[in-house]
């Protein structure tokens, strides 16, 4: 939340803009000094406004708000680098929503691992009519992720993400498993 910052000076002090008669008036200078202290954070935000809309530069609390503003798939528990990446990728993910690539990228940004996706569909062409139809007759989608330390909330989070990013007509299942640990040599 934006607020006062100790020691932050105003980029445009009001005391210097007062008429000359108030230049040496201690009460007037202290009064506008208080106004400067209140206005300094606002002026600082306005001076740095373009940085607030760049997820790589914005303060973390503003980036969380920005995530809700652009519709990024976040839940508030992700680490800062993943939060910033999700906000930066939000517009792209909206363009590819409902595709395998969009689903994979959404899950990767949320969990930091690439999911295993299996689906029933397919695409093909044929020079002859009534050729074989690719894929399976019943649509289905299955998404699996392997996490180093899966928790009970991970499957619910994955289910929520897949429900939002899958093709609308596609029934789905999700699974979260523990990643296999490779022995170190």
Image (spheres, helix red, strand yellow):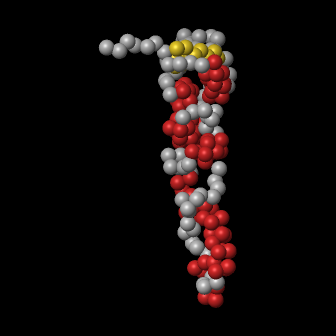
Q: How many marks?
A: 0
Residue 101 visible in this rendered orientation of the protein: no
Up the image or down, 126 lies above or below 79; here it is above
In which image quadrant can residue 71 be found? top right
Residue lying at the far front of the rendered structure: 26
Look at 60% across and 80% down and name the residue there: 17
Look at 40% across and 13% down and name the residue there: 182
Give coordinates of residue 36: x percent, y percent. 62, 69
Look at 61% across and 16% down and name the residue there: 174
Give coordinates of residue 14: x percent, y percent. 61, 75
Q: Say whether residue 111 is left or right of residue 34.
A: left
Residue 13 visible in this rendered orientation of the protein: yes
Residue lying at the far left of the rendered structure: 185
Q: Nearer the viewer, residue 49 or 120?
A: 49
Residue lying at the far bottom of the rendered structure: 21
Give coordinates of residue 93: x percent, y percent. 56, 35
**Image quarter (top left, top right, bottom left or bottom right) of the C terminus:** top left
Q: Nearer the viewer, residue 36 or 63?
A: 36
Up the image or down, 30 lies above or below 153; here it is below
In which image quadrant can residue 66 be found? top right
Look at 54% across and 34% down and name the residue there: 79
Up the image or down, 111 lies above or below 7; here it is above
Give coordinates of residue 1: x percent, y percent. 65, 50
């Amino acid at each position: 939340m934006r607020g006062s910052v100790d020691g932050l000076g105003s980029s445009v002090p009001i005391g210097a803009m007062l008429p000359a008669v108030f230049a040496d008036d201690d009460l007037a200078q202290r009064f506008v000094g208080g106004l400067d202290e209140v206005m300094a954070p606002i002026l600082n935000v306005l001076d740095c406004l373009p940085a607030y809309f760049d997820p790589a530069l914005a303060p973390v609390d503003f980036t969380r708000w920005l995530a809700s503003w652009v519709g990024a798939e976040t839940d508030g528990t992700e680490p800062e680098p993943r939060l910033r990446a999700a906000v930066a990728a939000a517009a792209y993910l909206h363009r590819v929503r409902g595709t395998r690539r969009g689903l994979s990228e959404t899950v990767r940004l949320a969990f930091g691992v690439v999911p295993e996706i299996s689906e029933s569909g397919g695409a093909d062409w044929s020079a002859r009519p009534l050729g074989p139809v690719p894929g399976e007759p019943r649509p289905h989608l299955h998404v699996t992720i392997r996490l180093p330390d899966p928790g009970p909330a991970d499957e619910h989070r994955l289910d929520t993400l897949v429900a939002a990013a899958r093709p609308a007509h596609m029934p789905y299942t999700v699974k979260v498993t523990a990643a296999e640990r490779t022995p170190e040599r």
